[in-house]
Amino acid sequence: MRRPTALHPMGLRGLLAALVLVGATACSTAAEPAPPAAAPAGAPAAAPVAATTAGLVETGVTVPAGMGAAPFDVPRAVLAPAGWTATVWARVPKARLEIWAPDGSMLVSLPGSGEVARLVPGANGAPPQQTTLVGGLTQPHGMAFDGTTLYVAESDQVTAFTYANGTVSDQRVVVPGLPDDKSPDLRGAYAHALKSVVVGPDRALYVSVGSTANVSPQDRDATPQRAAILRVPPGSSTPEVFARGVRNGTGLAVAPDGRVWTAVNNRDNIPYPFHQPYGGDGDAFGQVIPGYVNDHPPEELAALSPGRDLGWPYCNPQPDEQPGVPGSPLRQGDLPFVRDAETNPDGSRLDCGTLAPLEQTFGAHSAPLGLSFTSLPGLGAGAVVGVHGSWNRTSPRAPEVSFFPWSGGRMGDQQTILGGFQAPDGSRWGRPVGAVTGPDGALYVSDDQAGAIYRVVPKA
């Protein structure tokens, strides 16, 4: 973390405002910061860097002819279940979220260039044909289909197109006025501009709108509300708040039972929230302690319902089996919330005990991005998430593709199904963004740092 061992939260406000703009780039771009310095005093000596790689084996990445530019100019390998294979299927610079079109082609969002790319699978394993489906957009990110209607979430609006025969027509804005860094009231200070969108079973649009900053309580009173999942009824262009206190719910998908789920990038530099010592003497309440920050708060994977509140920035998920005790075992699912010592020190802003327990989590600072539901051989039904990896943790949380088993409407604990993108020194050659199952049953993984789409074939 490269922070002093303890800082009073009142002295952090200016620092946090500056840090969040840097930190958000890890959630929004492929920029790779330098590896962190050695762990400061108070940090654990051997922090976990992935959910778990138990049972995974090193698998060489197959690189077809013509796709060997960096980082594939040297041999690369991933960690995957035994018998799985991984191939570079396409080279797509800054590839972000993916979706399969009704005609069997893949669409990939490219926020940096304002484009949506279209990839048509080649015959007999040939590389896909790549073209630009549409350009001139403002940071396009999430995409969703409703029949032949393609919705694209831009930073400032949701745009709809009619999709047919690999082309789009009838471009129209269906949700205008979403906040981004051009919004007059934000004056360029907006850290989480990228939006995601999904069509619910009710045919309403659900749109993720991230927070302005790491800690910006004013988002909860903004119009339209930020740090929220908005619902836009069919035929309407006016969003309503569906769920709030969602700091940056980039992952957005509909589960088999019809509920909308979100994978959330949670806050950084959380002050210690308990009136007790932490690895020393005296009351540590309100201090920012690197050893505590490393694993708190966990990132969220939550099922949404009308009016649900995930608490940000007043309440945070509490994973410790022994609350606030250094080295306590961490639980992943069914977590309670604890008050934020900076924004809600006396609990008056929000009673954290009234919040519904959090269904599932990722390790703190994982940066989960694309979320999808699928079924994989040997694993069954579940949620698949592209995990970008931390930007400010010591040791860095590794990028990976995670799987959460799904049974009876409940989500099991996080499992790593694709890793190996990070070296022991913290350097990385790739950072997954999204993972979706293709018509052929393979898992297609986008990587915005490597500029690649991988075709991962599970063992039947």
Image: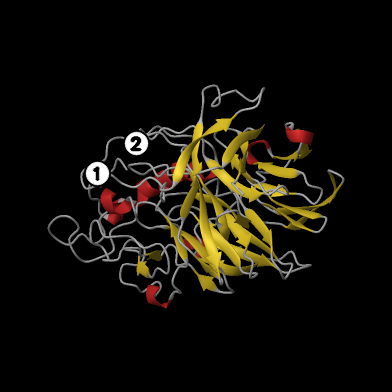
**Could you say which is closer to the camera, residue 215 or residue 354?**
354
Could you tell me residue 225's position as x and y percent? 57, 63
The residue that mark 2 highlights is 36
Quarter where residue 338 is shown: bottom left
Per the rendering, the mark at residue 45 is: 1
Residue 10 rendering spot, x and y as whole percentages? 29, 56
Give left or right: position of 356 versus 206.
Answer: left
Q: Amino acid at mark 2?
A: Pro
Q: Nearer the viewer, residue 239 or 392?
A: 392
Q: Which residue does the image show at 67% across and 43% down from the upper left?
A: 109
Quarter of the image containing the N terminus?
top left
Structural crowding at the residue carrying mark 1, measured as other residues with C-alpha within 10 Å and reported as few (<14), some (14–19) or many (≥20): few
Which quarter of the figure has residue 224? Answer: bottom right
- The answer to whether residue 417 is left or right of residue 437 is left
Helix, strand or loop at mark 2: loop
Labels 2 and 1: the sequence-earlier one: 2
For the view shown, which residue lies furthest in the left direction? Answer: 281
Label 2 or label 1, whichever lies nearer to me, is 1
Q: Residue reaching furthest bottom? A: 354
Residue 335, compared with residue 108, is above or below; it is below
- Residue 305: horizontal and vertical position, in percent? 58, 73
